[in-house]
Amino acid sequence: MYLEYCEFGDLNRLIAKYRTKGHYFPEPFIWETFHHLAVALQALAQGPIPRWPNTPEHPDNELKTYWIHRDIKPENVFLAAGESFEKDSVPAYPRAKLGDFGGCKPTGEKVESNPWHMKGTGTEGYKPP
């Protein structure tokens, strides 16, 4: 398991801070966060992450695993120091990291019930229709 310290907390906490002060996020920050989350979702959706080493007994095309997060919400988007912090460039926005993969499930092309068996999971208010 790989864990990274995200010194800026989660997106939900940052949203709450901005709301209490009556401020809005800068548009470049929104686009930067969107980009980081899109890259994370692309890695989950397009995979492939081999389950075990490619061997003649287990050809690569049978080992591809794709993942469904099932609980994307501001509380599961963590904010870490981005490259702009290390390079002292401006503007310096935190790097969004998708986390909390506890409800994440593997799926694949050969799963008969894909993706219908995933229906009904996640946090109320953030579930897809």
Image (cartoon, grey):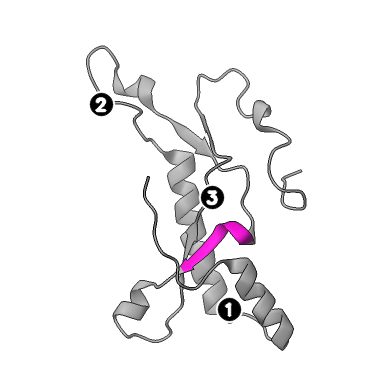
Q: Quadrant of the N terminus?
A: top left
In percent of width and height, residue 41 lies at 50, 49
Give yes or no for residue 77 being in the magenta stretch.
yes
Tell me, for residue 100, which label it has, or none.
3
N-terminal of the two: label 3 or label 2?
2
- Quadrant of res 102: top right
At label 2, the amino acid type is Pro
Circle 2 packing at 10 Å, graded few (<14), some (14-19), many (20+), is few
Residue 18 in the image: above or below residue 58: below
Q: Which residue is mark 1?
A: 27
Of marks 3 and 1, the one in the foreground: 3
Q: Is residue 18 left or right of residue 28?
A: right
Of marks 3 and 2, the one in the foreground: 3
At label 1, the amino acid type is Glu
**Which secondary structure lies at badge 1?**
helix
The residues tagged by marks 3 and 2 sit, at their Cα atoms, a distance apart of 26 Å
Pick the front one: 84 or 104: 104
N-terminal of the two: label 3 or label 1?
1
N-terminal of the two: label 1 or label 2?
1
Q: Is residue 113 left or right of residue 81?
A: right
Circle 1 packing at 10 Å, graded few (<14), some (14-19), many (20+), is few
At label 3, the amino acid type is Asp
